[in-house]
């Protein structure tokens, strides 16, 4: 989950520049926006939401292969704060999340960027059935946070850059504690970024280090992925209990470039809350086949060195409990700690509504069907 820590870990045994300490920068962003009310119960929180974000980040210049492939992004860690419109029911929000900032297009003076951050947040007030029953948005103090930004940047000197853009910040606990409608905050942003010391001259150079075992060398192969996930769902508000979820994900992926893989998935999910609901409706204990959901999906994986983001979208084709609907989406954050083994954090949703967040381990195997032909 900690993006910059995972990316930093890939630097082991890779070349370092003696100028690496000269490319740290500090960014301060002022934000102003409003709550995107996606449930009627959240309409009472419609108001303007001022916020501030402070980011310490490092510019890259190609000392690792993924840096060159993604047009030399920057990565770091951000602190985000908002009073959330001054409503006592939802209080204030404090978030801390690693970020990575991808340049979409740029020249010496200006650029367009996409920034992604995933981390943790603390909300000072959350749902309580007696003392804070109006807050259906968040059921726990600690939550996951995610941020997406698109911004325009203009360099005003060698040291400083101005920025303006749009951002979306999301808070949710993944249904580990209900209620969990989540908070989605859309903001307009303005900011200033300054280097903490003289900028690194190497930022204008382009290095391309050698391949490492987990990197793509142009060969064609199918990748067989098998992963597990275990999660807990708090459904005390609806069913009066907490339930466990056990899942097995299989994906067949074809890597088409250094960055991208496409494929298809087959999932098996055993959710104890489904067993509870089926038992009530059938007046008998459901068998394993009735209680297990089987899903088919299309998959896309974005690779950033040892870290990757796997997106699945599909539908359940078996299993009797489908009150949440047949269609599902899943976002999996993976970290490959060996060439074959990886850890994963999976967020499963139904049309944007979080179902569970699971953690687990996975294994991948390769079936090569075309060897890269060397040139020269």
Image: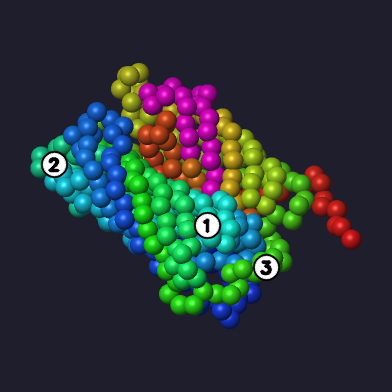
In whole angstroms, how far apart are the C-alphas of marks 3 and 2?
A: 55 Å
State the SS at label 1. Answer: strand
The foreground one among 264 and 124 is: 124
The residue depicted at 46 percent of the width and 45 percent of the height is 346
Circle 3 crowding by C-alpha within 10 Å: few under 14, some 14–19, many from 20: some
Query: x, y (%) of residue 226?
Result: 59, 45
The residue depicted at 89 percent of the width and 61 percent of the height is 376
According to the picture, the residue beneath numbered tag 3 turns out to be 207
In whole angstroms, how far apart are the C-alphas of marks 1 and 2?
A: 47 Å
Is residue 323 found inside the magenta-colored segment of the image? yes
According to the picture, the residue beneath numbered tag 2 turns out to be 132
Is residue 152 found inside the magenta-colored segment of the image? no
The foreground one among 122 and 243 is: 122
The foreground one among 314 and 16 is: 16
Magenta residues span 307-330
In whole angstroms, how far apart are the C-alphas of marks 3 and 1?
A: 22 Å
According to the picture, the residue beneath numbered tag 1 turns out to be 110
State the SS at label 3. Answer: loop
Assess whether mark 2 and mark 3 are in contact (beta carbons under 8 angstroms): no
């Amino acid at each position: 989950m900690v993006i910059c820590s995972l990316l930093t870990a890939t630097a082991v045994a890779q070349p370092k520049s003696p100028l690496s300490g000269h490319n740290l920068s500090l960014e301060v962003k002022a934000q102003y926006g409003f709550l995107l009310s996606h449930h009627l119960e959240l309409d009472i929180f419609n108001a303007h939401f001022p916020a501030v974000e402070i980011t310490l980040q490092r510019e890259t210049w190609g000392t690792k292969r993924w840096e060159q492939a993604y047009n030399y992004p920057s990565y770091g860690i951000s602190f985000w704060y908002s009073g959330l419109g001054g409503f006592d029911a939802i209080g204030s929000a404090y978030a801390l999340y690693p970020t990575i900032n991808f340049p979409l297009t740029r020249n010496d003076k200006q650029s367009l960027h996409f920034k992604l951050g995933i981390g943790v947040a603390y909300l000072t007030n959350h749902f309580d059935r007696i003392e804070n029953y109006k807050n259906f948005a968040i059921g726990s103090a600690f939550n996951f946070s995610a941020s997406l930004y698109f911004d325009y940047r203009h360099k005003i000197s060698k040291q400083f850059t101005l920025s303006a853009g749009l951002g979306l910040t999301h808070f949710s606990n993944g249904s580990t504690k209900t209620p969990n409608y989540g908070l989605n905050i859309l903001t307009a942003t303005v900011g200033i970024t300054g280097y903490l010391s003289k900028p690194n001259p190497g930022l204008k150079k382009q290095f391309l280090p050698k391949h490492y075992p987990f990197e793509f060398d142009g060969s064609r192969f199918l990748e067989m992925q098998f992963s597990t996930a275990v999660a807990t769902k708090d459904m005390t508000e609806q069913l009066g209990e907490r339930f466990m979820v056990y899942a097995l994900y299989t994906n067949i992926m074809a890597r088409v470039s250094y960055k991208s893989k496409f494929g298809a998935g087959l999932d098996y999910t055993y959710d104890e809350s489904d067993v509870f609901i089926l038992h009530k409706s059938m007046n008998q204990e459901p068998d394993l086949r009735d209680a297990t959901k089987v899903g088919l999906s299309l998959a896309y994986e974005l690779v950033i060195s040892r870290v990757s983001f796997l997106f699945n979208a599909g539908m359940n084709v078996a299993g009797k409990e489908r009150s949440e609907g047949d269609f599902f989406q899943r976002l999996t954050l993976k970290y490959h700690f060996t060439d074959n083994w990886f850890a994963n954090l999976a967020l499963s949703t139904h049309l944007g509504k979080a179902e569970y967040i699971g953690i687990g381990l996975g294994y991948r195997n390769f079936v090569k069907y075309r060897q890269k032909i060397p040139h020269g």
